[in-house]
Image (cartoon, rainbow, N blue to C red):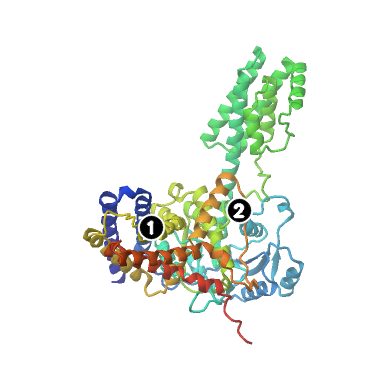
Amino acid sequence: MRRFLLRLAILLALVLGANYIVWRWLASVNWDAWWIAVPLVIAETYSFLDTLFFGLTMWRMKQRGEPGPPLDATVDVFVATYNEPIPLVMATATAAREIRHPHRTWVLDDGNRPELREAAEAAGIGYLTRSANWADRPRHAKAGNVNNALFATEGEFLLILDADQVPDPEILTRTLGYFRDDKVALVQTPQYFGNVDAADVLGSQAPLFYGPIQQGKDGWNAAFFCGSNAVLRREALMQLGIAGYVDAVERSVRSTLRTAGTVVAKARRRARNLPERRALAAVAEGVRDAEAALRADAPLADVTWRFQQGVAKASRLLVAADVQEMQAALASLGASGQVVVEDDAPLDDDQLDLLASSDLSPIGAIESVRSLARSLDVIRSEEAEPLSPLATISVTEDMATAMQLHSHGWKSAYHHEILATGLAPEDLGTMIQQRLRWAQGTLQVLLRDNPLTKRGLSAGQRFMYFSTMWSYLSGFVALVYLAAPVIYLCFGVLPVEAWSFEFFVRFLPYFAANQLMFLLASRGIKSWRGQQYALTLFPVWIRACWSAAANVFFGRPLAFVVTPKERTGVARTPWRLVWPQLTAIVVLSVALVVGLARFAFGDADGTGVLVNVVWVAYDLAVLSIVFRAARYRGPEPKEE
């Protein structure tokens, strides 16, 4: 009955919402004030699509029963740490050691601290840090830390814990049963924080996400990895590593062949005699053959070997024709500052671009292509490990890895039982830092591996991943919702044709149905704090959008910052962190006074003022959380 009522509310909200949005676009936009009217109707359309995505998520909400008996398998428990206090790390590690199912516990110390090594070894706990292979190579933050440990351990399954997430002794007993299905690669459990009181001033608990939303995604086989408190199948991760390795090498080979083809095509136009033309034609044919072999899925080793042999043969023919001229051309090539490559050194992207744009002589072109052929990098020497089981395309490796698993046909499960207790941020600055990183990482995945176009995902999985990524675009929508009532109350500019009966008869039922859907889906869960921060953090979401885009498209660094697990000791109230929200509060308050004054003097429509006063009052109620959040310093320490 609950599911029936929920689905009925979802259908009602979507039908009424579609009716309202269509009417808004076709009959109510005030085109005379298009500069605010169009952004507002776009914002409302975004909100309707939010309703659609939420409704789809809840449509197949899965409430799993009791898990089956645990699988008899070997398990490695990873406690990932970078710079967290050693007592905190050891509290988690010793609790992990006491997990009842047979396993081996490892501390993965990305900070390489001798004192932590001593503490772990004294407690009988394994200790791992990066191997020497990682020196002067990309570290990939937590993903790199776990990938390094994967090649130093052997367990069939992995339990991954953040340094502060103290596990329940039954965590493996309660989750390993799901893996009796050979296609299950991931079991995620909730993240719960023991240092958050009932007020949850910073909105850390996220009971709606670690509950109905993950259960809804689970119904679509799209419950995803959240970085901690999850068990993963090693076989599935290694499959990702192998697939990623093959894709990376194939991209490298394709790029090298394209560059070789460009170099040869330019050189053929400058060939001066028959031996040069024949040699260049042979190389061009070799490039075409190699590209055709790649399209036919031929083994990469065979493709590269044949290409290298063909170029070497063409080079020998050319050398036999004119050794002296070739030597002179090579000397000239080096003197002119062209790229010279050692026999076994892979070319980077800048060198490939330089070669492709160079006007080499035919002889110089052959030698350059020989260098390209020798430099084909099938061992991925730019990486510490050729295989990267956990995704490294984002600072949030968890979602990216889960999406890869699902695209390869693996299943996931969400087990809705608190089996680990962690520490939430205890001040506003730390919370903002954490949320910014989450948003940046999620948007990196969207820009680099869009789920809507990703092969292997079902339609439901595409929408489940996209809906999470889509939510971080709400910062721009929030700006419109904050600006629209201010513009009306202060200047009388109406973004709709009129606050008419037609407006209310469409909007109010849609709004009521939307709230009913939300209430039935949340099942009494207190989610007001989460709704407050969804709007209040609009500057963070906007910053995440432009910084993630700058990173993906322009290579601007996006530093990974570990969320502090202890109080920062900052005594001052960090008002500077929330100056956009404070500015919005001041502007809204001024608009409220101005609008009421305009109404009192007969300069504004009563219905319009009432609607916008209610709108402003709601915005102020939501944004008011910043005052408590800025002063918050975490719960008082418990006395021993």
* Quadrant in which residue 508 is drawn: bottom left
In the foreground, 22 or 317: 22
| Residue 243 shows in the view | no
Compute the Cα span from label 1 to label 2. Answer: 36 Å
Q: Is residue 8 left or right of residue 441?
A: left
Among all residues in the image, which is located at the extreme bottom?
A: 640
Query: For the residue marked with disc 1, what is the amino acid?
Result: Ile
Q: Please tell me how crowded label 2 is: few (under 14), some (14-19), or many (20+) other residues with Cα within 10 Å.
A: some
Where is the C terminus found, in terms of image quarters? bottom right
Which residue appears at 68% of the width and 20% of the height?
361
Q: Quadrant of the N terminus?
A: bottom left
Q: Amino acid at mark 2?
A: Leu
User: Mark 2 and mark 1 in contact (Cβ < 8 Å)?
Assistant: no
**Label 1, on which residue?**
487
Q: Secondary structure at mark 2?
A: loop
Query: Disc 1 or 2, which lies upstream in sequence?
Result: 1
Residue 68, position in %: x, y?
46, 71
Q: 429 or 231: which is nearer to us? A: 429
Pair 1/2: label in front: 1
Above or below, comparing residue 376 to residue 469 in the picture: above
Q: Quadrant of residue 227?
A: bottom right
Q: Which mark is residue 558?
A: 2
Residue found at the far front of this picture? 601
The reply, left or right, for residue 498 in relation to residue 618 is left
Residue drawn at x 34%, y 52% is 37
Residue at point 35% right, 58% down?
A: 488
* Residue 602, above or below 325: below
Looking at the image, which residue sits at the far top?
273
